[in-house]
Amino acid sequence: MSDAHARPGPPLWLLCELTYRCPLHCVFCYNPVDFSRTGAELTTAEWLRVLTEARALGAVQLGLSGGEPLVRDDVETIVAAAHDLGFYINLITSGVGLNEERLQALKRAGLDNIQLSFQDSTRQMNDFLSSTRTFELKSKVAALIKKYEYPMVLNVVLHRLNIDHVEEILAMAKTMEADYVELANTQYYGWAFKNREQLLPSRAQLARAEAVTQRFRAENGERMRIFFVVPDYFERRPKACMNGLGSIFLTITPDGTALPCHAARMLPGLSFPNVKKASVEHIWVESSGFKHFRGDAWMKEPCRSCPEKAKDFGGCRCQAYLLTGDAANADPVCDLSPHHHLVTETVARAERAAAQSAAAEVIILDPLYSTHDQDENDTRAMAALCQSLLRLRDASRAALIVVHHVRKSITRYEIGSAFRGSSALHAVGDSYMLLTRPSPQLSTVELRFQFRYAAAQPPRLLQLDPQTLWFSSTGQLPAAETPRRKVEKADVTQALAGLGPQARYSQLREQIMDRAECSKRTAQMAISVACQQGWIVQDNGQYHLPL
Amino acid sequence: MNTIAATAKPAIGRGMRLQWEPAQKAHVLLYPEGMIKLNGSAGEIMKRCDGVRTLSEITADLERSFATTGLGDDVAAFVAMALQKKWLEMRS
Ligand code: SF4
Ligand code: SF4
């Protein structure tokens, strides 16, 4: 067990939130919801003292963020001091306020890297999301950043409203010659927690965005590094919180409050000291706010005895608190948590809200397995999935088209029952269309129909044109597919007559199947009917015509 | 694996910085929003990659400093790996 009282390692990462002020008003902002109640911003001199003390403890990566840090006019002074102390300095900005003059001054001061945050690559969406016309400005800023030879990180916060634009975002990043692109999905704290059902993407959107990213990487190589961060609501294990709270990360908020993470202020029962009153060393090493979640003595079950606790540290304390009301619980993203359903239910509600707000008339889930993580062989899981499909249909008032694969071996005349996870799926569908290949030798595929409330259409044969990838109807059906006629008395008696004076059951059955072109089962039925009616006689396992 | 010319002059990659961190008792390589703590030998090699000295000069200097011989292959292998990770780039 790691010890909360041993002297901690250095706060390698120091994040200085210079101000909460920001000219943008993003729906997913991390800013505390009640930031208007926080105290006065630290002065330049106070920031310089923070930097000196943190550097002496071993801090080396410095983030300068906000709000919009450039709202302050002493950023250049702070950068110069940080550079002299030996920090690697990252400026995290929306780009508003970054003109050529300031870029030059920052370069002289020793700024190492600029992270430019974007809400989306399409101006319309960007304007909508931050309610300000900033897109063109950011493009200009990006060009300037490259002109002054800074490495550039583009950070795009993804959510339901922009995640479908990943392809354009990556193309834009490439044009801007970004060195790194972070496609970070919103973390649900602050404003975003309140808006999460509007912001959470659907599983299908997420899968598509990841596929687009993969393809882009494959086509464009490694010059631009892309990080795609999946929202943890879709995971079964929580993300590791920076090696655990209080182990490498130190945030100083605009008014000087020191936090082990930018969201930790919400955690109840912890007091976080202010750098106006205490030294950074005292805060980091001695204060209860930083010591409390260090090590693992604070953990409850299931984390306490979990072998994975050294890997994920029980996940995010803030998320545990927000969702379960107790910051010492396992992060409910973990499916070992008894509160995991709170996460899955939120995802389900968000999917329904997405469908509703889209006012769709038809929703296509293509393929079904991209929308869930259940075991398709598990009937109960599939039944639950079907229930959520029905809820989605009812909430959206749209028609659902579900594209799904069939079981490995299906019989010739199966339709709705052929789908994987079938009994459950078969119970909820209103109509089924099944595409099969009648035989591997044929280039045609067969489309079969089954309707709950209407008579089935005869199957159609479709031919694929490999040039146009277009299916056209070939019009004709192979012999075996002619609509089956009823097996008549004559079929049975003539079949039997053709076999000589008497015949065994299996011989007779085969003969009937041949003559009437029917299935084995139909032939069996015909034999038993013929026996009942006295058209044929069964004697000691042998069949013959009545004498 | 070793395709690097002995006359090539490796330098710290653009946007990266190498420095000694007393708190970690190690050389660290700093880059946008991240950091790698180098082990002793990696640190010794990297700090000699100044874009002026060639690979063979770096190797010779290392062998002199540590009173040993035959470091050539190890140094070349490390430099190849570091180039691939963009910790280093080549100057001509
Ligand atoms: S139970 Fe706790 S420690 Fe174990 S995997 Fe889940 S969150 Fe991590
Ligand atoms: S506690 Fe949660 S919000 Fe805070 S740093 Fe860790 S993961 Fe992030």
Image (cartoon, rainbow, N blue to C red):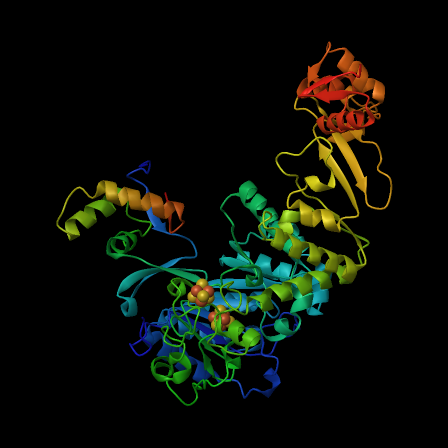
The residue that appears at 53% across and 80% down in the rendered structure is: A266
Could you tell whether A526 is left or right of B72 in the image? right
Farthest residue in the right direction?
Answer: A454
Query: Of residues A486 and A448, which is closer to you in this image?
Result: A486
Tell me: residue A383, above or below residue A533.
below
Give how far across and how far down residue A106 sits, in percent.
Answer: 49, 68
Return the residue nearer the eye: A470 or A513.
A513
Residue at figure coordinates x 80%, y 31% from the top left: A459
At x 33% / y 77%, what residue is drawn?
A4
A2 and B52: which is toward the camera? A2
Residue A378 x, y percent position in the rendering = 59, 50
Residue at image position (66%, 21%) is A541
**Is A275 above or below relative to A189?**
below
Q: How many labels does the image show?
A: 0
**A167 over A66 or under it: above or below:** above
In screen coordinates, is A224 left or right of A428? left
Where residue A384 sits in the image (x, y, percent)? 65, 57
Looking at this rendering, what residue extends furthest in the left direction? B67
